[in-house]
Amino acid sequence: MTTLRLAIVGAGPAGIYAADILRKAERRFDVSIDLFERLPAPYGLVRYGVAPDHPRIKGIVNALRDVLDAHTVRLFGNVDFGTDITLDDLKRHYHAVIFSTGSFFDAPLAIPGIDLAGSHGAAEFVNWYDGHPDVPREWPLDAASVAVIGNGNVALDVARMLSKHADDLLPTEIPDNVYRGLAASPVTDVHVFGRRGPAQVKFSPLELRELGEMRDVDMILDDEDFDYDEASKTAIATNKQILVIDRVLQQWRQRPVGQAGRRLHLHFYAAPTEVLGEGGRVTGIRYERTEPDGAGGVRGTGEFREVGVQALYRAVGYFGSVLPGVPFDEKRGVIPNREGQVIGDDDQKVPGVYATGWIKRGPVGLIGHTKSDAMETVSHLINDQASWWSPADPSEQAIPALLAARGVEFTTLDGWHNLDAYEIGLGEPRGRARVKVVERDEMLRASQRSRPAAG
Ligand SMILES: Cc1cc2nc3c(=O)[nH]c(=O)nc-3n(C[C@H](O)[C@H](O)[C@H](O)COP(=O)(O)OP(=O)(O)OC[C@H]3O[C@@H](n4cnc5c(N)ncnc54)[C@H](O)[C@@H]3O)c2cc1C
Ligand SMILES: NC(=O)c1ccc[n+]([C@@H]2O[C@H](COP(=O)([O-])OP(=O)(O)OC[C@H]3O[C@@H](n4cnc5c(N)ncnc54)[C@H](OP(=O)(O)O)[C@@H]3O)[C@@H](O)[C@H]2O)c1
């Protein structure tokens, strides 16, 4: 029977689900899968995106871990595709590759002043509070008033992490430097700006409700945002999510405010037009008041308003990154593909190359969605046998030997288990489930205790 040697690049949920689905798929051939991950830890945005105060979602790692622990996939951590291993290497050693590299960077927001000091991308802040090894350890939390642009779940995560008292995050896995940074924050007011109305938001009811449950934080809403047009009324009447969102907001409108030490302001119909600055630093945000256009969208009213803030976060979406040798859609930030089969400039399928997850579909959707993504991609891979590569050396030993010869300090599944146990051990004496290790060197040291010899 043929053995399919498959490389998967990116050990987030999309890559891990793809491995699992392929392993369980109908068996016309044997499967041998190597999963490459540029970080010493797997799980992608589940570890480095999902907020630390969402332990239930973080718990998805248990299901992902079961897939890795089935030992039908080899994990090569700390291996960056494009630097440590290339497409030519993969063609020499595998029949095909699935890219599941997700999205790491913030989408741009082209308004004047966006590059001022104090203006940040939400992804940068998320990476900091979730302890990503490749971002600086210190975060400038020196603003009393902060703006967050966007009405998606990332905007709510960022607004919540900025507003919440640091001590209320102590039971979570937040790294020590993050606790210290948040504990010293002088923030009093967080302003969230959505360019459309309450019935057109992208965030979900659960995430919204959580904002109102924060200790010592008042929710501030403006009556003028609730004069609903017909399209909004229809959305509330026909869409259960929007109905619940409206209920939550209406409850907050009735709540007494004025006692809390911090305030979270939700501004709707507010399209940011400029980040204001002085001496190169953010001093405020200017936005245009919008109004419903009758069809679920909005139009500008020509009325501009300003709010003074000393820091600003744009949470207007993530964006994928180019992978050397792999087609890339610069506009959408994805690998161009048809149902996961990668498409070249000539609009033809690129043999042997597949994509899944956010890098296939764009940075929208929940963890569960990456499962259906993976199913679609894997079904094409299985049926495309005629267009697989013909590797010169498909042996399993070739890869650890190649990485070792290049001096790549790769980690393995055992290494991840070591790091995992180390982090849990750091949390134990303090009554915490885990304390995340942030420095890459320390991650590698903790991983390497039982690293097997190469080759
Ligand atoms: C801030 C934030 C919070 C979220 N919270 C939730 C939530 O609470 N619930 C929910 O259901 N969904 C949530 N999501 C959505 C969820 O995270 C995504 O749906 C999911 O992670 C996408 O999976 P993925 O595998 O495609 O990408 P990722 O999770 O991004 O995984 C990609 C992996 O590829 C690796 N990689 C990238 N480039 C390379 C390379 N060159 N070489 C090797 N490896 C590489 C990365 O390091 C990463 O590990 C959140 C998203 C964000 C941004
Ligand atoms: N707890 C969770 O379940 C959780 C947490 C985080 C993320 N996620 C998921 O991860 C995915 C990504 O989330 P996300 O928040 O990054 O993206 P998103 O849901 O697409 O939201 C992006 C937001 O940015 C706004 N926006 C875009 N361009 C803008 C501009 N030029 N000016 C003003 N606003 C602009 C959008 O407004 P318009 O709608 O008007 O375009 C939208 O409100 C989502 O599917 C989300 O549900 C889930």
Image (cartoon, rainbow, N blue to C red):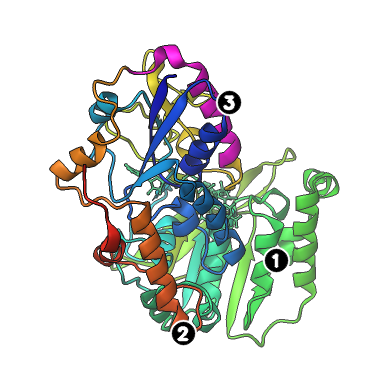
Who is closer to the viewer here, 43 or 65?
65
In the picture of the structure, the residue carrying the numbered disc 3 is: 26
In the picture of the structure, the residue carrying the numbered disc 2 is: 430
Check disc 3 and report its element: helix, strand or loop: loop
**In-image side of 293 versus 163 (left or right):** right
Instruction: Check residue 3 in the rendering and tell me which mark sits there, or answer none.
Output: none
Are there few (<14), some (14-19), or many (20+) residues within 10 Å of tag 2? few
Residue under the image location 33 percent in, 57 percent down: 415
Residue 283 seen in this snapshot: no
Would you place residue 183 above or below residue 8 in this image? below
Q: Is mark 2 within 8 Å of ligand 1?
A: no
Q: Amino acid at mark 3?
A: Glu
Check disc 2 and report its element: helix, strand or loop: helix
Residue under the image location 33 percent in, 55 percent down: 40
Q: Quadrant of residue 342?
A: top left
Are there few (<14), some (14-19), or many (20+) residues within 10 Å of tag 1? some
Who is closer to the viewer here, 162 or 46?
46
Q: Which is in the foreground here, disc 1 or disc 2?
A: 2
Residue 4 seen in this snapshot: yes
Range of magenta residues: 370-389
In the picture of the structure, the residue carrying the numbered disc 1 is: 209
Quarter of the picture containing the C terminus is: top left
Quarter of the picture containing the N terminus is: top left
Check disc 1 and report its element: helix, strand or loop: helix
Tag count: 3
Who is closer to the viewer here, 209 or 117?
209
Which secondary structure is most common in the magenta stretch? helix
Q: What separation in Å lies between label 1 and label 3 (alpha carbons)?
A: 43 Å
Q: Amino acid at mark 1?
A: Arg
Q: Position of residue 240 (x, y in %)?
A: 80, 50
Are there few (<14), some (14-19), or many (20+) residues within 10 Å of tag 3? few
Q: What separation in Å lies between label 3 and label 2 (alpha carbons)?
A: 47 Å
